[in-house]
Amino acid sequence: MPANLPSERRRTGRVPHRARIVLSGVDADGFNFAEETETLTVSKHGLSARTSYALPLGQEVSVRTKEKNRVAQFKVVWVGRPDTPNDGSVGMEWVEPHCFWGVEFPPDNWEPD
Protein backbone atom coordinates (compact mmCIF):
# COMPACT_ATOMS: atom_id res chain seq x y z
CA MET A 1 0.00 0.00 0.00
CA PRO A 2 1.42 3.43 -0.92
CA ALA A 3 2.62 5.52 2.01
CA ASN A 4 0.31 8.44 1.23
CA LEU A 5 -2.94 6.51 1.76
CA PRO A 6 -4.79 5.94 5.02
CA SER A 7 -4.37 2.47 6.40
CA GLU A 8 -7.14 0.03 5.53
CA ARG A 9 -6.99 -1.33 9.08
CA ARG A 10 -7.42 1.38 11.66
CA ARG A 11 -6.04 1.19 15.20
CA THR A 12 -9.22 2.79 16.59
CA GLY A 13 -12.47 4.17 15.25
CA ARG A 14 -12.73 7.64 13.78
CA VAL A 15 -15.38 10.05 14.99
CA PRO A 16 -16.73 12.70 12.63
CA HIS A 17 -15.96 15.90 14.54
CA ARG A 18 -15.75 19.38 13.07
CA ALA A 19 -13.57 21.62 15.19
CA ARG A 20 -12.11 24.93 14.05
CA ILE A 21 -8.32 24.74 14.31
CA VAL A 22 -5.23 26.68 13.36
CA LEU A 23 -2.70 24.41 11.68
CA SER A 24 0.85 25.77 11.61
CA GLY A 25 4.33 24.60 10.81
CA VAL A 26 6.62 24.32 7.79
CA ASP A 27 5.26 23.26 4.40
CA ALA A 28 6.90 20.99 1.79
CA ASP A 29 8.74 24.00 0.30
CA GLY A 30 10.26 24.94 3.66
CA PHE A 31 8.04 27.98 4.28
CA ASN A 32 6.39 28.72 7.63
CA PHE A 33 2.60 28.77 7.46
CA ALA A 34 -0.46 29.19 9.65
CA GLU A 35 -3.90 28.28 8.33
CA GLU A 36 -7.33 28.36 9.90
CA THR A 37 -9.18 25.19 8.91
CA GLU A 38 -11.25 22.43 10.53
CA THR A 39 -10.96 18.81 11.47
CA LEU A 40 -12.87 16.20 9.49
CA THR A 41 -12.50 13.31 11.92
CA VAL A 42 -10.72 12.72 15.22
CA SER A 43 -9.58 9.57 17.02
CA LYS A 44 -7.65 8.51 20.09
CA HIS A 45 -4.51 8.62 17.92
CA GLY A 46 -4.95 11.76 15.83
CA LEU A 47 -7.08 13.62 13.33
CA SER A 48 -7.76 14.31 9.70
CA ALA A 49 -8.16 17.85 8.40
CA ARG A 50 -8.27 19.87 5.21
CA THR A 51 -5.33 22.06 4.27
CA SER A 52 -4.33 24.12 1.26
CA TYR A 53 -0.63 23.52 2.01
CA ALA A 54 1.55 20.66 0.76
CA LEU A 55 2.77 18.86 3.87
CA PRO A 56 5.38 16.11 3.65
CA LEU A 57 4.95 12.79 5.43
CA GLY A 58 6.62 12.86 8.82
CA GLN A 59 6.40 16.65 9.15
CA GLU A 60 5.51 17.85 12.64
CA VAL A 61 2.83 20.53 12.82
CA SER A 62 1.12 22.43 15.59
CA VAL A 63 -2.66 22.30 16.02
CA ARG A 64 -4.46 24.93 18.10
CA THR A 65 -8.18 24.66 18.77
CA LYS A 66 -10.06 27.91 18.20
CA GLU A 67 -12.75 27.17 20.81
CA LYS A 68 -10.59 26.29 23.82
CA ASN A 69 -7.17 27.51 22.65
CA ARG A 70 -5.53 24.12 23.27
CA VAL A 71 -2.26 23.41 21.44
CA ALA A 72 -0.65 20.06 20.59
CA GLN A 73 1.98 18.68 18.22
CA PHE A 74 1.06 16.19 15.49
CA LYS A 75 2.97 14.33 12.79
CA VAL A 76 1.66 14.00 9.20
CA VAL A 77 1.09 10.28 8.49
CA TRP A 78 -0.94 10.40 5.25
CA VAL A 79 -1.69 12.87 2.51
CA GLY A 80 -4.72 12.68 0.23
CA ARG A 81 -3.85 11.96 -3.39
CA PRO A 82 -4.53 14.64 -6.01
CA ASP A 83 -7.76 14.27 -8.02
CA THR A 84 -9.40 12.04 -5.40
CA PRO A 85 -12.02 12.83 -2.74
CA ASN A 86 -9.13 13.01 -0.22
CA ASP A 87 -7.26 15.69 -2.20
CA GLY A 88 -6.40 18.48 0.23
CA SER A 89 -6.77 16.27 3.31
CA VAL A 90 -4.05 15.14 5.69
CA GLY A 91 -4.00 12.59 8.46
CA MET A 92 -1.99 13.34 11.55
CA GLU A 93 -1.13 11.42 14.69
CA TRP A 94 -0.19 12.70 18.11
CA VAL A 95 3.45 13.31 18.89
CA GLU A 96 2.46 12.86 22.57
CA PRO A 97 -1.16 11.64 23.02
CA HIS A 98 -3.41 13.32 25.57
CA CYS A 99 -7.03 14.36 26.08
CA PHE A 100 -7.61 17.19 23.63
CA TRP A 101 -10.98 17.12 21.87
CA GLY A 102 -13.45 16.60 24.71
CA VAL A 103 -14.92 13.71 22.72
CA GLU A 104 -15.71 10.25 24.05
CA PHE A 105 -14.42 7.66 21.60
CA PRO A 106 -16.05 4.28 20.89
CA PRO A 107 -14.32 1.14 22.23
CA ASP A 108 -11.49 -0.20 20.05
CA ASN A 109 -13.63 -3.20 18.98
CA TRP A 110 -16.59 -1.00 17.94
CA GLU A 111 -17.97 -1.59 14.44
CA PRO A 112 -20.32 0.93 12.76
CA ASP A 113 -23.73 -0.40 11.65
Image (cartoon, rainbow, N blue to C red):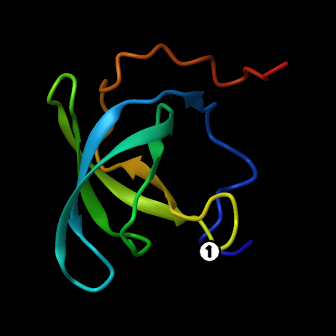
Crowding around mark 1 (Cα neighbors within 10 Å: few <14, some 14 to 19, many 20+) is few
| Rendering quarter of residue 59 | bottom left
The relative height of residue 66 versus residue 79 in the rendered view (above or below) is above
The relative height of residue 57 versus residue 97 in the rendered view (above or below) is below
Drawn side of residue 11 relative to residue 41, left or right: right
| Rendering quarter of residue 56 | bottom left
Q: Nearer the viewer, residue 109 or 69?
A: 69
The quarter of the picture where the C terminus appears is top right
Q: Secondary structure at mark 1?
A: loop
Taking the spot 64% from the left edge, 57% from the top edge, the residue there is 6
The quarter of the picture where the N terminus appears is bottom right
Taking the spot 60% from the left edge, 71% from the top edge, the residue there is 4
Q: Outermost residue toward the right?
A: 113
Give the labeled residue for mark 1. Answer: 82
The relative height of residue 13 versus residue 84 in the rendered view (above or below) is above
**Number of numbered tags placed on the structure image:** 1
Looking at the rendered structure, the kind of residue marked 1 is: Pro
Taking the spot 37% from the left edge, 30% from the top edge, the residue there is 19
Taking the spot 14% from the left edge, 29% from the top edge, the residue there is 69
The relative height of residue 34 versus residue 29 in the rendered view (above or below) is above
Image x and y of residue 25, in percent: 20, 64
